[in-house]
Image (cartoon, rainbow, N blue to C red):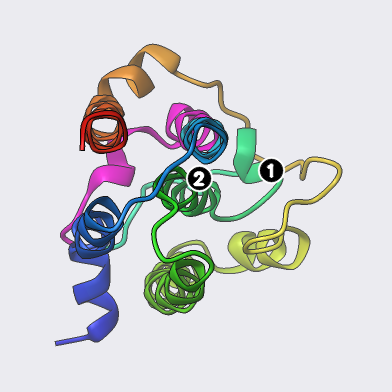
Amino acid sequence: MDIRQVFFKYRSYTPIPLVILALIFAKPTGTTFWSGLCVMLCGEAIRFWGVAYAGSTTRTTTTAGGDRLITDGPFAYVRNPLYVGNFFLSAGYLIMSWAWMPWMIGIYLPLFAFQYGMIVHLEEAYLAERFHSLYEEYQKQVNRWIPRVRPYRGKDRSLPRYAHALRSERTTFLTILLVWTLLLIRWRLL
């Protein structure tokens, strides 16, 4: 089995051990709790914006895919806005918990880079094979992780579907609420 496919399939579950460790060893303060929440919400805003353009195909776990190359919305600035959002979601949670800082960030960064490096490599191989020169041009113009200043103008234009994104992101919203609540309980009551 392709290790990239394993990381792709289980990408929603791989942060769970780190989340549990951060909850167990949490030492939040008012500053870390609320600033970490702001970082988390920024991450979810990026994700939500991306899902509004990409749709629920971003929720697939079977294999990398897509019937069209999305180059609008946040994809006009960075090729992987959902994963950038995921980065800030998790980093925000770690800031909220303030467990083992700064060592936890030292653990998180290489784990995130390894996992999402594998996932992105898999997805890019699919996109290059499926969209050929269209993807090659997009890849040359838009960075993988660091946003452009001006939006890329691709050939296909699409409109965001925010109502659809609300439905698609409800699991993420519930997860954010759950970890926020658990950490709040941990901070205030334990």
The front one of 171 and 184 is: 184
Left/right of residue 153 with respect to residue 86 in the rendered view: right
At 64% from the left edge and 61% from the top edge, which residue is drawn? 145
Left/right of residue 5 with respect to residue 129 in the rendered view: left
175 in relation to 62, above or below: above
Magenta stretch prevailing secondary structure = helix
The dot on residue 85 is 2
- Residue at the farthest right position: 149
x, y percent for residue 165: 37, 23
Quadrant where the image shows the C terminus = top left
x, y percent for residue 8: 27, 66
- Residue extent of the magenta highlight: 45-62
153 in relation to 163, above or below: below
The front one of 35 and 145 is: 35
x, y percent for residue 122: 38, 74
110 in relation to 139, above or below: below
Rounded to the nearest angstrom, the CA distance separating label 2 from label 1 is 15 Å
Residue type beneath disc 1? Ala
The dot on residue 76 is 1
Left/right of residue 172 with respect to residue 71 in the rendered view: left
Left/right of residue 50 with respect to residue 1 in the rendered view: right
At 80% from the left edge and 51% from the top edge, which residue is drawn? 148
Give SS at disc 1.
helix
